Image (spheres, rainbow, N blue to C red):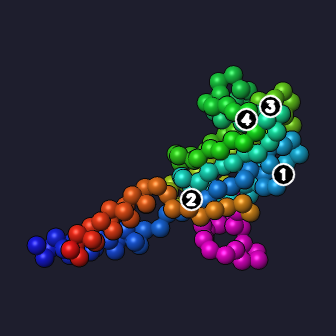
């Protein structure tokens, strides 16, 4: 019985030690998803991880957000889009590591620069999105020169909430 209590306490300690925060990025910051934004510059210095969310804001019907393959990104083709939305507020949670490609499907917009490539690391890891030195993922109040997203919210991911709930339940059982 003592061994199971020790294991329960260790599990609770491990659950509390794990911190996984998701960041919400407003694509293009205050400019949103528009033809006048350089999205390569916007991604520069940002690190994206599984669980982060991209929020595209634009006038409904004025643009689209199409997730496409790398070749369709390069050619600005929406013929084989993975997903497409034109509602004016598109939120995409990054679920897998790797590079994800987004373009506007309105003729001329993608070729005019309305395209975004985001390289995603695993949950809680950093992945540089440009050849520059990677920026560590930090949470808390931004420092004056930090690269903290201008529109971010640190939220606990659902998997961590589940783990913490189980840890609290085990702790209650241990204390009973």
**In this rendering, which labeled residue sits more in front, label 3 or label 1?**
3
Residue positioned 71% across, 67% down in the render: 147
**Residue 12, percent from left and from top:** 32, 71
In the displayed structure, would residue 122 be above or below residue 14? Answer: above
> Mark 4 to mark 3: distance in Å?
7 Å
Is residue 4 among the parts visible in the rendering?
Answer: yes
The single residue placed furthest to the left in the displayed view is: 1
Could you give the CA–CA distance between mark 2 and mark 4, rounded to whole angstroms? 24 Å
Disc 1: CA contacts within 10 A as few (<14), some (14-19) or many (>=20): few
Which secondary structure is most common in the magenta stretch? loop
The residue lying toward the viewer, choosing from 174 and 130, is 174
Instruction: Reply above or below: 121 against 61.
Output: below
**Residue linked to disc 3:** 61
The outermost residue toward the top is 79
The alpha-carbon separation of the residues under discs 1 and 4 comes to 17 Å
Q: Is residue 63 visible?
A: no
Question: The magenta stretch spans which residues?
Answer: 130-149
Q: Nearer the viewer, mark 3 or mark 2?
A: 3
Is 90 or 114 nearer to us in this picture? 90
Residue 131 among magenta residues: yes
In which quadrant will I find the N terminus? bottom left
Name the residue tied to disc 4. Answer: 87
Could you say where residue 123 lies in the image, as x and y percent from the top left?
A: 50, 57
Tag 1 near tag 4, CB within 8 Å: no
Q: Which of 37 and 61 is in front in this view?
A: 61
**Residue underneath mark 2:** 22
Inter-mark Cα distance, 3 to 2: 29 Å
| Depth check, front residue: 166 or 147 | 166
Image quadrant occupied by the C terminus: bottom left
Give the mark toward the camera: 2 or 4: 4
Look at mark 1 in the image and give the residue it sits on.
31
């Amino acid at each position: 019985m003592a061994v199971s209590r020790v294991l329960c306490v260790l599990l609770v300690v491990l659950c509390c030690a794990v911190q996984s925060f998701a960041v919400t990025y407003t694509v293009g910051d205050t400019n949103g998803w528009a033809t006048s934004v350089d999205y390569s510059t916007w991604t520069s210095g940002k690190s994206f991880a599984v669980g982060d969310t991209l929020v595209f804001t634009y006038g409904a019907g004025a643009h689209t957000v199409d997730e496409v393959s790398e070749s369709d990104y390069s050619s600005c083709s929406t013929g084989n889009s993975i997903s497409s939305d034109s509602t004016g507020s598109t939120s995409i949670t990054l679920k897998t590591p790797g590079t994800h490609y987004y373009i506007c499907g309105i003729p001329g917009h993608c070729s005019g620069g309305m395209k975004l490539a985001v390289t995603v690391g695993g949950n809680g890891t950093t992945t540089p999105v440009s050849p520059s030195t990677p920026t560590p993922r930090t949470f808390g109040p931004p420092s004056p020169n930090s690269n903290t997203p201008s529109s971010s919210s640190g939220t606990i991911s659902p998997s961590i909430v589940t783990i913490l709930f189980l840890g609290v339940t085990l702790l209650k059982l241990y204390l009973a």
